[in-house]
Image (cartoon, grey):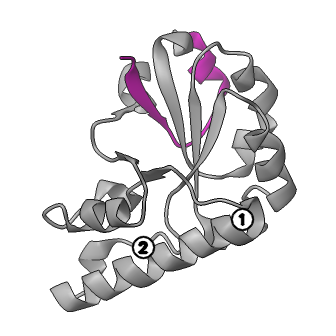
């Protein structure tokens, strides 16, 4: 199995890495993902674009049409990265954290159903935060089979 590379921002420097040796994951759904899409899609490896559904169509982020175009590539998966993308540690109580996880996940999954016609099979935890496996367990209960968090290597670590 290939190591998983986490990419937030795509820069020219990224293309100096042996990208075909990794499963490539892109966080947040920003416009640079579209700007470099043709170059990325030519790399012979699996790619997952994790999108923040509440930001699709807003300034600096992918449009719905761009997400749909990307999803047509057989080497690309569109995964969930939450609806609102907030840090769980900014919430005070466990009850608040659990309520947020449930509501945010429902909104994210609903967005996928409405706009892409299916739920995502992959998900990346925002800020790689889980609460003793509760977030992961909730996502699995919703049918999400592949969940990514801190096991990914940040491309910044390889480039430095």
Answer yes or no: is residue 111 visible. yes
Circle on res. 56: 1
> In the image, 150: left or right of 145?
left
Above/below status of 58 relative to 39: below
Helix, strand or loop under label 1: loop
The image quadrant of residue 120 is: bottom right
Residue 95 percent location from the top left of the image? 21, 90
The image quadrant of residue 32 is: top right
Residue 147 percent location from the top left of the image? 37, 48
Helix, strand or loop under label 2: loop
Circle on res. 86: 2
**Residue nearer the viewer, 32 or 150:** 150
Q: Residue at x 30, y 74 (%)?
A: 88
Q: Quadrant of the N terminus?
A: top left
Circle on res. 123: none
**Residue nearer the viewer, 157 or 118:** 118
Above/below status of 23 relative to 108: above
At label 1, counting other C-alpha atoms closer than 10 Å, the crowd grade (few under 14, some 14-19, many 20 or more) is many
* Residue 28 painted magenta: no
Residue span colored magenta: 1-17
Answer yes or no: is residue 93 visible. no
Q: Earlier in the sequence, mark 2 or mark 1?
A: 1
């Amino acid at each position: 199995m290939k190591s998983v590379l986490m990419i937030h921002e795509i820069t020219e420097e990224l293309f100096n890495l042996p990208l075909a040796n990794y499963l490539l994951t892109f966080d947040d759904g920003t416009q640079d993902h579209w700007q470099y899409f043709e170059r990325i899609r030519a790399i012979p490896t699996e790619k997952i674009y994790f999108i923040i559904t509440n930001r699709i169509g807003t300034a600096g982020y992918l449009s719905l049409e761009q997400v749909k175009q990307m999803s047509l590539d057989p080497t690309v998966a569109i995964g969930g990265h939450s609806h609102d993308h907030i840090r769980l540690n900014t919430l005070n109580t466990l009850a608040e954290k659990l309520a947020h996880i449930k509501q945010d996940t429902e909104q994210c999954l609903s967005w996928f159903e409405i706009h892409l016609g299916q739920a995502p099979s992959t998900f990346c935890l925002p800020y790689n935060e889980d609460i003793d496996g509760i977030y992961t367990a909730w996502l699995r209960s919703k049918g999400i089979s592949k969940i990514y968090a801190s096991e990914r290597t940040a491309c910044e670590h390889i480039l430095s």
